[in-house]
Structure formats: C-alpha cells, structure tokens
C-alpha cells in the first residue's frame, strides 16, 4: 500500500510538471507574440512602409501587405540630385525611388502565394541578418530604404518575436512589384 502511494505521488508529480511546463510554453509563446507586436508597431515601425496609406491614414485592410499591386511607382531622375532630392516616394508611402533604383515595400503577411507564408523563421532571421532575400547571400539584396543594417543588430529573441507576430497577422493576397534598377528594369 505504501509503495502504491509513492508510485501514485510520483506519477502525479510527473503529470503536474508536464502540465506546468505546457502552460508555461503557451504563456511564453503568447508573450513572444505580444513582444513581436510591440517591436513591429513601435520599435521597428514596419507598418510605416509596409502598410500603404490612403491619404494620411493607414489602409488597415492592407496591414503589412506592402505596396498595393497595380499602383503607380515613383520614378527618380538623376537631375534631382542637383536640387537636393535623394529619394522620392509613391503617394501610399510604400514604394521608393532613388539612385539605387525603385523598391517596393514587400508583403509581410503570411499569405502563402504573395507574402511570407512559405518562409521559415530561419529565412526571416537570415534576411534580417544578411540583408538578402530569404537570408541567402546569393539572392538579391533587400533595397533601401529598408534599414537592414539596423535590424541585423537586433537580438535573435527580438527577431523571433517579430516572426511570431507576423505569423498571426491576417494574410493579404497582394503581389508586390519586383525591384527596378535605375533604368526602370526589374533587378
């Protein structure tokens, strides 16, 4: 009888530990998502470029979906340098043109066809660390004004939190234009 009581207590202790660790894991993931939301909205300010505007307001139906498909893009002219103009932007403030060419804020939503839906956490962190698409150095560079040098300095935990939050955002189907070189040709 004493032996059965000890076995029962050990089993209950083991089950309790598993439940406690599971609850902690769920709480940790929730905390990570909330931290990611804070980083996306307040620190990294991703929505400033990746959420297009309608007038002065953000188009929340396109939250983090990048430059709207089919919308015009700005066109930089090198004569602008003489006037002190180094970058021009589309009215939605989600496409940018300068001496580097024209870049379009990409779709950060988890849409599988047009966003980050097929990406992995490792690809995302790699892209932020290397400044190259999907974190592969042989892929194209991520173009200005994306501050990849600043994001590369973020901790792994912060980048993982941003990734966790981005996975919870509503997917938006929006095929963003490819980047263009200074002659207006796709890079």
Image: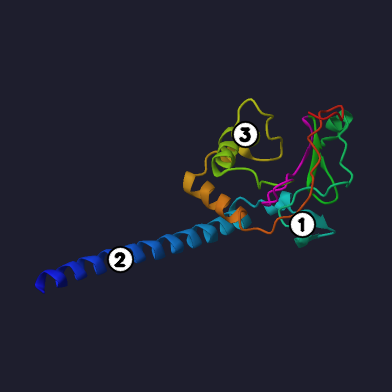
Pick whichever of labels 2 and 3 is earlier in the sequence: 2
Q: Quadrant of the N terminus?
A: bottom left
Closer to us: 86 or 132 = 132
Query: Please, what secondary structure does the residue beneath circle 3 have?
Result: loop
Q: Which mark is residue 62?
A: 1
Mark 3 and mark 1: Cα distance apart in space: 24 Å
Q: Is residue 160 magenta?
A: no
Main SS of the magenta part reads loop
Q: Contact (CB < 8 A) between labels 1 and 2?
A: no
Q: Is residue 89 left or right of residue 152?
A: right
Q: Mark 3 highlights which residue?
A: 131
Tell me residue 48's x, y (percent): 71, 52
In primary-sequence order, the first of circles 3 and 1 is: 1
- Residue 147 at what x, y percent from top left? 64, 40
The residue positioned 89% from the left and 44% from the top of the image is 72
Q: Establish if 88 lies above or below 182.
A: below
Q: Magenta residues? A: 100-113
Which quadrant of the structure image shows residue 14? bottom left
- CA gap between label 2 and label 3 equals 45 Å
- Report whether 121 appears left or right of 140: left
């Amino acid at each position: 009888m004493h032996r059965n009581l000890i076995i029962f207590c050990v089993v209950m202790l083991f089950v309790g530990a598993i439940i406690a660790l599971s609850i902690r894991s769920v709480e940790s993931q929730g905390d990570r998502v909330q931290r990611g939301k804070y980083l996306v909205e307040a620190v990294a300010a991703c929505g400033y470029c990746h959420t297009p505007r309608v007038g002065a307001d953000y188009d929340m139906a396109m939250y983090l979906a990048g430059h709207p498909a089919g919308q015009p893009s700005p066109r930089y002219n090198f004569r602008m340098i003489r006037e002190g103009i180094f970058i021009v932007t589309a009215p939605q403030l989600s496409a940018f043109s300068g001496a580097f060419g024209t870049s379009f804020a990409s779709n950060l939503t988890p849409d599988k066809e047009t966003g980050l839906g097929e990406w992995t956490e490792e690809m995302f962190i790699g892209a932020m660390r290397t400044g190259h698409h999907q974190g592969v150095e042989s892929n194209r560079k991520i173009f200005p004004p994306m501050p990849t040098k600043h994001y590369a300095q973020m901790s792994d935990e912060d980048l993982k939190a941003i990734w966790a939050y981005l996975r919870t955002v509503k997917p938006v189907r929006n095929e963003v234009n490819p980047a263009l070189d200074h002659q207006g040709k796709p890079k």
